[in-house]
């Protein structure tokens, strides 16, 4: 892909973008207090797009979490 500056072999057994986005949603459902992105290749449209989806699905998970009825212990 034109936005893949590191090449497909940069992480040969890495997770697919679907897996990363799905995990972000699951984390949102469980809740979190902080998040950080490190080592983002400059000018990589592919990675930027995935990060936008990660943030979107994470926020959707957080919103869904707040809508669930509270379970008393």
Image (cartoon, rainbow, N blue to C red):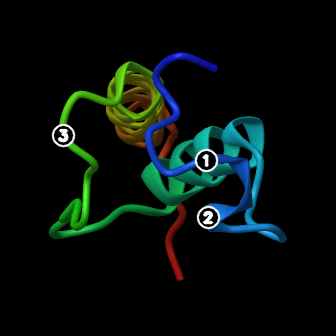
Residues at badges 1 and 2 in contact (C-beta under 8 Å)?
A: yes
Q: Do callouts 3 and 2 mark residues in contact (Cβ within 8 Å)? A: no
Decide: is 16 above or below 30: above
Q: Is residue 52 left or right of residue 50?
A: left
Q: Is residue 70 visible?
A: no
Q: Secondary structure at mark 1?
A: loop
Classify 10 Å Cα crowding around label 1: few (below 14), some (14-19), many (20 and above): few
Residue 19 % position (x, y): 75, 48
> In the picture, residue 22 is in which quadrant?
top right
Q: Is residue 65 above or below residue 64?
A: below
Give the number of the disc on residue 66: none
Q: CA distance from mark 3 to mark 2?
A: 15 Å
* Residue drawn at 71 percent across, 48 percent down: 8
Mark 3 crowd level (few <14, some 14–19, many ≥20, 10 Å Cα): few
Question: Which of the marked residues, 3 or 2, is nearer the chain's N terminus?
Answer: 2
- Residue under the image location 54 percent in, 62 percent down: 71
Q: Which residue is mark 1?
A: 7
At x 53%, y 16%, the residue is 2
- Which circle's residue, 1 or 3, is located before the other in the chain? 1
Mark 3 residue element: loop
Distance of label 1 from label 2 (alpha carbons): 6 Å
Give residue 18's position: percent from left, percent from top: 74, 36
Q: 53 or 30: nearer the eye?
A: 53
Q: Which mark is residue 42?
A: 3
Q: Which residue is mark 2?
A: 10
Residue 62 as seen in the image, left or right of residue 6 = left
Secondary structure beneath label 2: helix
Q: x, y (%) of residue 38?
A: 22, 67
Can residue 61 be seen here? The reply is yes
The quarter of the picture where the N terminus appears is: top right
Total number of numbered labels?
3
| 24 left or right, relative to 5 | right
């Amino acid at each position: 892909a034109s936005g893949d500056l590191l090449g497909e072999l940069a992480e040969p057994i890495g997770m697919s973008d679907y897996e990363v986005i799905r995990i972000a949603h699951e984390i949102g459902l469980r809740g979190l207090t902080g998040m950080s992105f490190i080592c983002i290749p400059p000018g990589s449209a592919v990675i930027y797009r995935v990060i936008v989806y990660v943030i979107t699905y994470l926020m959707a998970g957080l919103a869904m979490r707040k809508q669930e009825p509270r379970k008393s212990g």
